[in-house]
Amino acid sequence: MLVSVWKPLLAMVEEREKSIHQAVASAQQSSEEARRLLVQHQELIREAGRQRDEVMKRALADAEAVRADIVVQAKAEADRMVQRAKEQIEREKKVAIQELRGSVADLAVEAASRIVKSSMTPEAQRRLVHEFIDNLPQSGS
């Protein structure tokens, strides 16, 4: 009788032991799968970090190129502005010299006419004025 009671108990213990072994094996499999997934996840994070660094480097390089281009364009525009200003100054200088020559000629004619009002002919007066203008200092250009 002891054998007949003992057999079902032994079968139950063996079944329980088998179930525990399967649970342990399943837990080990799950643990290995979790470690594999963790390693994979860590590699993905490292790759994402490398990609982020690469994108940042490209963005910084692009920004530097844009900055350099803006500096070059600004310098070229400044040079053009300076050149236009110099040309404008030169034009205004020539106009001022011409106006000054005209004013000086008018003053010279007026002065000469007062001094030699009756003694010179109009043609002689014009010659005197032209000689005076021709002897004026030339502009610096």
Image (spheres, rainbow, N blue to C red):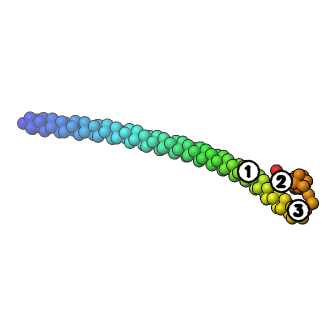
Distance between mark 2 and mark 1 Cα atoms: 12 Å
> Which residue is at the front of the view, 108 or 134?
108
> Which residue is at the front of the view, 16 or 32?
32
Specify the quadrant of the image occupied by residue 17: top left
- Badge 2 amino acid: Ser
Q: Earlier in the sequence, mark 2 or mark 1?
A: 1
Q: Are marks 2 and 3 in contact (CB under 8 Å)?
A: no
Q: Name the residue under label 1.
A: 91
Judged from this view, the residue extending furthest toward the right is 119
Q: Quadrant of the N terminus?
A: top left
Answer few, some or many: residues within 10 Å of disc 1's Cα (few below 14, many 20 plus, some between 14 and 19): few
Up the image or down, 98 lies above or below 50; here it is below
Apparent side of residue 39 relative to residue 5 in the rendered image (left or right): right
Judged from this view, the residue extending furthest toward the left is 1
Mark 3 falls on what kind of element? loop
Q: Mark 2 points at which residue?
A: 139
Mark 2 falls on what kind of element? loop
Answer few, some or many: residues within 10 Å of disc 2's Cα (few below 14, many 20 plus, some between 14 and 19): few
Up the image or down, 96 lies above or below 39; here it is below
Q: Where is residue 16 in the image (x, y as percent from the top left)?
A: 19, 39
Distance between mark 2 and mark 3 Cα atoms: 31 Å
Residue occupying the point 15% across, 35% down: 11
> Which residue is at the front of the view, 58 or 141?
141
Q: Mark 3 points at which residue?
A: 117
Q: Where is residue 24 in the image (x, y as percent from the top left)?
A: 28, 40
- Badge 3 amino acid: Lys
- Badge 1 amino acid: Arg
Apparent side of residue 69 relative to residue 25 in the rendered image (left or right): right
Q: Earlier in the sequence, mark 2 or mark 3?
A: 3
